[in-house]
Image: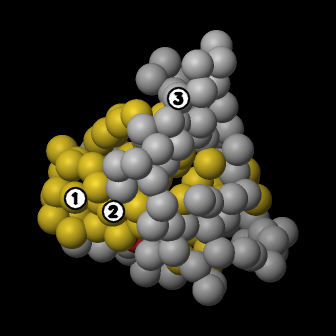
Amino acid sequence: MGRYVKNYAINDQALALGIVNTSTTDRPAGKNGQIIYNTTTGTFQVYDNGWTNISTGSSSAALITKDSFDGDGSTIIFTMTVQESNPQNILVFIGGVYQIPTTNYSVSGYQITFGSAPPAPTGVPGDNDHKITILHGFDSVGS
């Protein structure tokens, strides 16, 4: 599964996700899977062997669509509501942990396939490690 961002606030009641704000000068060297908001360019960027914009920085609102699923410890294929051809165009979290495109999952049409099955619920109150959140609408716009 993924690593770097652990945010238990990403659940069905979440209203927002906090992303690190930094300038081009101050942004980190980068590790694959990191996400930042670049205050110099006014764009969201993801590190995938280099910093790449995942937003245009324009003031027009993006259409973001959310899919939510529950892992069961055995299912690796889930059907999304939006057709995708590029795993870089979506943000995927399992239990609040960001999943790295092509490393942790692949997409084909309406299906997302995980390399290993997301965990089943533990039964512990407040445990969301089995919750899968997929955000669509982050089509790559260059670097």
Assign a secondary structure to mark 1: strand
Residue hosting label 2: 113
Query: Who's the residue at 69% across and 59% down the image?
Result: 3
Assign a secondary structure to mark 2: strand
Q: Quadrant of residue 35?
A: bottom right
Going by the image, does 61 lie left or right of 11? left
Query: Who's the residue at 22% across and 63% down the image?
Result: 84
Going by the image, does 32 lie left or right of 83? right
Q: Where 55 falls versus 17 (above or below)?
A: below
Q: Where 85 falls versus 97 (above or below)?
A: below
Which residue extends farthest top?
125
Residue hosting label 1: 111
Gap in angstroms between the C-alphas marked 3 and 2: 19 Å
Where's residue 19, x and y in %? 66, 47
Q: Quadrant of residue 76?
A: bottom left
Colour theme: secondary structure
Type of residue at label 3? Pro
Relative depth, front residue between 84 and 114: 114
Gap in angstroms between the C-alphas marked 2 and 1: 6 Å
Residue hosting label 3: 121
Q: Residues within 10 Å of mark 1 (few under 14, many from 20)?
A: some
Query: Who's the residue at 73% across and 58% down the image?
Result: 4
Going by the image, does 109 lie left or right of 123? left
Assign a secondary structure to mark 3: loop
